[in-house]
Image (cartoon, helix red, strand yellow):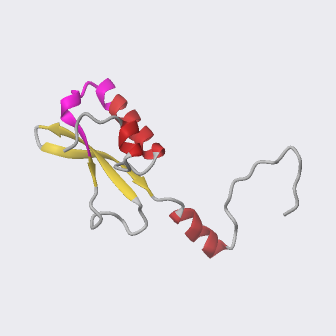
Amino acid sequence: MIEGMTLKEAVETKLIGNQTIAYFMARTYIFLTDLGIYPEAIRFRQHRSNEMAHYANECWDGEIECSYGWIEVCGHSDRSCFDLSRHAAKTKVELVAARPLKTPMKV
C-alpha cells in the first residue's frame, strides 16, 4: 500500500498512467467523502495485468471498507480508443473529432 503520495507525484512517477485517470480518482474520493465515508475507509486498488480486460491499459478499483470488508464501488479504466477503433473498423466510418483551423490547410 502506498500512502503519502499526491496524485501528481503518482502520475509523474508513472504509478498512475495518466492525468485523466488521476482526475477521476480524485473526483471519486471527493464524492465518497461527501457521502460521509471516512477517508481511512477509502482506497484505490490497481488491477494486476491478469485481472484487466485485454483492451485496457490500466484499471483501478475504488473500494470502501464496510461491515462486509473491502468492496469495490467503482472502477476506473484506461481503455484508450479500443471501442471506437473497433466500431470504426466494422462500420468503415472514421470516428475522430476535429476542429476547424483559422486558416485552412491542405495536407
Rendered location of residue 87, percent (x, y): 59, 68
Residue 58 shown left or right of residue 94 in the figure: left
Write the residue at 62% across / 74% down: 89
Residues shaded magenta:
32-44
Write the residue at 35% across / 43% down: 10
Write the residue at 36% across / 65% down: 53
Q: Quadrant of the C terminus?
A: bottom right
Rendered location of residue 1, percent (x, y): 19, 44
Rendered location of residue 73, percent (x, y): 28, 44
Q: How many marks?
A: 0
Foreground pick, 21 / 67 = 21
Foreground pick, 73 / 8 = 8
Q: Does the magenta stretch include residue 58?
A: no
Foreground pick, 4 / 51 = 4
Image-quadrant location for residue 33? top left
Residue 89 shown left or right of residue 83 in the figure: right
Residue 82 shown left or right of residue 97 in the figure: left
